Amino acid sequence: MLEFITQHIEMCYLIILMIFVGIELIGHVPSVLHTPLMSGANAIHGVVIIGSIIVMGQAEHTLSLILGFLAVVLGTLNVVGGFVVTDRMLEMFKKKK
């Protein structure tokens, strides 16, 4: 049981580190590159969603199932939000009637 808790604490540290690195990276992206990078990020998050679903299918503990479900929900929100933002940015380049 102690090993299980230790693994989850290590995962939490890793997630917190990834959040800070992600914020730092995204903060330095010029707006011109936003749309191409967002489409790539959407593809990556699609893979994250599929991986999370696979992990949820093999979950042995309730906490693993909850974290997998949370990953699916957050990944889905990120993909949908990315498509919405990309669509709004592409609307700026269309000719107005």
Image: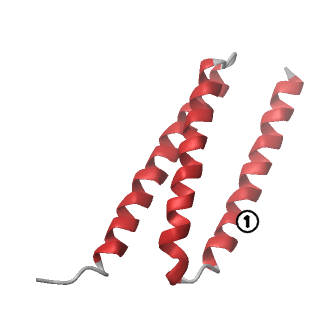
30 relative position to 82: left or right: right
Q: Quadrant of the C terminus?
A: bottom left
15 vs 79, nearest the viewer? 79
Q: SS at mark 1?
A: helix
Q: Which residue is mark 1?
A: 21
All told, the count of numbered labels is: 1
User: Does 92 appear above or below 65?
Assistant: below
Q: Residue furthest toward the left?
A: 97
Q: Quadrant of the N terminus?
A: top right
83 relative position to 22: left or right: left
Residue 93 location, quadrant:
bottom left
Residue that appears at 71% across and 65% down: 20
Q: Amino acid at mark 1?
A: Val
Residue 81 location, quadrant:
bottom left
Residue that appears at 56% across and 29% down: 53
94 relative position to 7: left or right: left
Within-10-Å neighbours for mark 1: few <14, some 14–19, many 20+? few
Residue 67, image x, y percentages: 62, 34
Residue 16, image x, y percentages: 72, 55
Residue that appears at 86% across and 34% down: 6
79 vs 66, nearest the viewer? 79
39 vs 69, nearest the viewer? 39
User: Does 5 appear above or below 27?
Assistant: above
User: Does 68 appear above or below 47?
Assistant: above
